[in-house]
Amino acid sequence: MKNLKTFIITEKGGFRHHIIPTVEMTIDLPAKFKGIHMSRLVESMTEVISDEFSVQHSIEDIQIHILEALQKKHAFQRGEIKFDFEFGYTSKTPVSNKRTWEVCDISATTIMENSCSNVHDVSVKVTGNTVCPHCLANNGGLTHMQRAIGILRVVGSTDQIPSYGSMIEVIENSFSSKTYSLLKLEDEVHVTKQMHENPLFVEDVCRNVLQHANDAYEDRQLEMYAGVRSLESIHKHDVIAEGRIVTNGM
Amino acid sequence: MKNLKTFIITEKGGFRHHIIPTVEMTIDLPAKFKGIHMSRLVESMTEVISDEFSVQHSIEDIQIHILEALQKKHAFQRGEIKFDFEFGYTSKTPVSNKRTWEVCDISATTIMENSCSNVHDVSVKVTGNTVCPHCLANNGGLTHMQRAIGILRVVGSTDQIPSYGSMIEVIENSFSSKTYSLLKLEDEVHVTKQMHENPLFVEDVCRNVLQHANDAYEDRQLEMYAGVRSLESIHKHDVIAEGRIVTNGM
Amino acid sequence: MKNLKTFIITEKGGFRHHIIPTVEMTIDLPAKFKGIHMSRLVESMTEVISDEFSVQHSIEDIQIHILEALQKKHAFQRGEIKFDFEFGYTSKTPVSNKRTWEVCDISATTIMENSCSNVHDVSVKVTGNTVCPHCLANNGGLTHMQRAIGILRVVGSTDQIPSYGSMIEVIENSFSSKTYSLLKLEDEVHVTKQMHENPLFVEDVCRNVLQHANDAYEDRQLEMYAGVRSLESIHKHDVIAEGRIVTNGM
Amino acid sequence: MKNLKTFIITEKGGFRHHIIPTVEMTIDLPAKFKGIHMSRLVESMTEVISDEFSVQHSIEDIQIHILEALQKKHAFQRGEIKFDFEFGYTSKTPVSNKRTWEVCDISATTIMENSCSNVHDVSVKVTGNTVCPHCLANNGGLTHMQRAIGILRVVGSTDQIPSYGSMIEVIENSFSSKTYSLLKLEDEVHVTKQMHENPLFVEDVCRNVLQHANDAYEDRQLEMYAGVRSLESIHKHDVIAEGRIVTNGM
């Protein structure tokens, strides 16, 4: 089941979030069945979500509850539920100190196997920028820069998954500069200076995301992936870099 | 300014909605200016939205307030603000009478000219289906059917714009059948029968949307457009139909 | 009919192009008909395209032939056919003088009314960049730059429509710099310098497109529109500008 | 490097194809390097493609040549190149026997590791349909049907990869019915009858793709994946099924 949309309210760390996720739900098909009772997938979700309106949970909790509710209606060995959604958060402009609203994309999946262990697979995608160090060094201080998109993906058990907010922070601090929906002239000057003082290839940003994630989550057990894509200002194509790191929580 | 995302809470007719719209905002450029003070567009929006958290409004009201706030910061003759967002609503399955969650796409634009008159341009896009009458008549009662997407667009002044809920209803009642995120077997049989009893070309659905909109809004002054797109099950391509009607509110 | 894909070979100005357009075809529905004979639309196109493999034409000619073929099968007052496709062309790197392959997006529509007059509506979309003049002037020579997308749309009769190549040139010359799929270090340094010497707001690029189009096509009768979108490197959102000009061919 | 577009002519089995692929190219970064010489990736491709205009090859051959050319310019342990493109082919209507033009999506990747072994990863995506057997059995012969999208992905060495044409055939024969860009009334009646005689869940189509691929390629060594997505006509969401099979060529 794919491309289903629904409406969810969550609360984590005192913040309430209202999201309309695009939902994908799959279960393995037991050998004795010809087809899946599709309506039971939707029913499980609808029931849990209706309940959730009173008792607020994290996305990961809601996904576990939906899979548990489904387990009672329709036996499966391996079930998987994914939410793709936009996630709003606030920030402050760097000099004028005004409040801004930012939005990033999150993809959160829970996999339940043998009705006992749950694995979560969460990707956060945030927009920032890169500045070419090679050109800066060969061009009397002038260089080109561009919008870039950074992804941090973490895979781990329920109590190991970090908050979305901390994952956003890890990615934002890995760019030449973070970006803002609002910038007054003094902010714009500040951001531009910072970009020139912090020139980074797309490969550097990718290494930064992995390094910062490792620093932030070294006491957790997580498999982590980073991916960065730079929308080159001097080319029509994008430049990408990818990497992987594992923390063992020790 | 395009592709900006933000976070808004609205209340209309007793229902509260939380949306993350993609925002597009444009103003004409007075001849004496070389460029627009871009940050003032974002600031106007951020200020109004922050206020809105206490006093809830309709989308159209929020858009007027943003343009009014902008007018004070940055003179313009013609300003335009568009929100694209997903809108969640509930429905009931036709036989088993279970509650379902449905989501449609809405695009809402407000245009302010000469700081006095406001025009709204609102499009609602809902998924339903079509059933081929031509094939049904030539094939012993067998035919092909497919998912279809219907759009109703209305253009008018603030007090003439109908509620999103009534626009959704106009479109849903124009298909061979409305569709549901959840259907038990008895519902599925009911919907399938209804589809065969109500075979409609994409042109028919388009005429229906215009007719139902005319019936529902004949006492309003609106320019209305309908568009329907059928994702043919026997072709790789889609089939479309478009039409227009004007009500003069008399 | 929408979203149909097909395969076409054209020849114009000695260059042969192979394209797979996404096709949209619509005709008005005569009052006496309940539905359109959909297969006649596809048949008209398939017949003309099969023929075209021997005799090569421009996209505009092919579209006229398809509408003429359709006119014989299925009466209509107003018929419209649109091709969306990718168009490949070659360029030279600015210093190292190497050949590069570039690709842009083209949307070409032909409208036939009352089986006599044909109007073409052609949009060409090319990627370049913008450099912020405001920040450059306030920041000791440092500024931010970003990828930008420029569109030139022309509407006119068959003999007035310019070549795609000249439309691409008009747009590319309107950016702070054109972009290339390949750049050696010496080219990159050159492009970066040129960008700093030619800082342009998105509004400036839009005015440039209109000005250059007016200069290039002042002896033609065309209605022309320009649109530019800048993928800001310091914001998560885009900045846009739009304009319009009419040449009367005198 | 991602999202680069270029222009390629290939010839396989006597058929010449002109494609504009979207290209993605990645190499691992040797520990001693801070960044990749990006221009060498594009140069390798441009050189090979320019040559290819005289000597025609399969997509897989072109990709190997590009990676070999890159290997000489820029050492790497693991290099990967992906082309996403639209692929046109002809078909015949089932009763009226008219020629039709069909287009499907292909994603072809070549991975070269340690400059010796090449692995290809090719996905073909074709549009067809599904018909609900459960509803048909419970509703007096009436049921719902919808457009569906089938994917066959094969992974193997250069001499094991099947032709795109045979992969298209495997997928098309797995649906309730294949679909056509053109259908006269007699064809439409035929297709609709066939759909009712061959009702298939999305899970059935997925099993069919794997079974037909196994039958067609049992003498090859391939890892194969199938994925099917049904654009339900009675729901707003899609239904999906996925599976995997390995042939050992014996």
Image (cartoon, coloured by chain):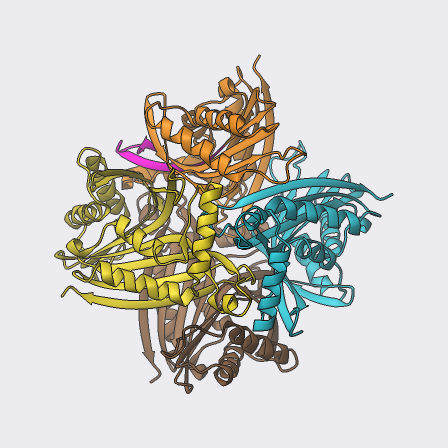
Chain colours: A cyan, B brown, C yellow, D orange
Residue at 33 percent of width and 50 percent of height: C106
The quarter holding residue B170 reads bottom left
Q: Nearer the viewer, residue D121 or A240?
A: A240
Q: Viewed as shown, does residue B70 lie left or right of A88?
A: left
Task: Kindly report the secondary structure that dominates the magenta region of the rendered protein.
Answer: strand
Please tell me whether residue A170 belongs to the stretch shown in magenta. no
**Quadrant occupied by the C terminus of chain A:** top right
Magenta span of residues:
D89-108
- In depth, the one of C122 and C139 nearer the eye is C139
Q: Looking at this view, is B56 or C85 the one in front?
A: C85
Vertical arrangement, residue B158 with respect to residue A81, above or below? below
User: Farthest right residue?
Assistant: A250
Please name the residue shown 69% across and 60% down the image: A49
Is A64 rendered above or below residue D248?
A: below
Instruction: Provide residue B117's location: percent of width, then percent of height.
Output: 40, 85
Residue D199 visible at all: no
Residue sitting farthest toward the front: A140
Residue B57 at x, y = what percent?
Answer: 57, 80
Q: In the rendered picture of this protein, how many numbered marks are placed on residues? A: 0
Where residue D61 appears, as percent x and y from the top left, is 45, 23
> Between residues B169 and C105, which one lies in front from this camera angle?
C105
Rendered location of residue C170, percent (x, y): 30, 56
Magenta includes D103? yes
Q: Residue furthest top?
A: D250
Extreme-bottom residue of the structure:
B116
| Residue C192 in sight in this render | yes
Q: Quadrant of residue D28?
A: top right
Question: What residue lies at 39% left-to-right and 23% top-to-bottom?
Answer: D57
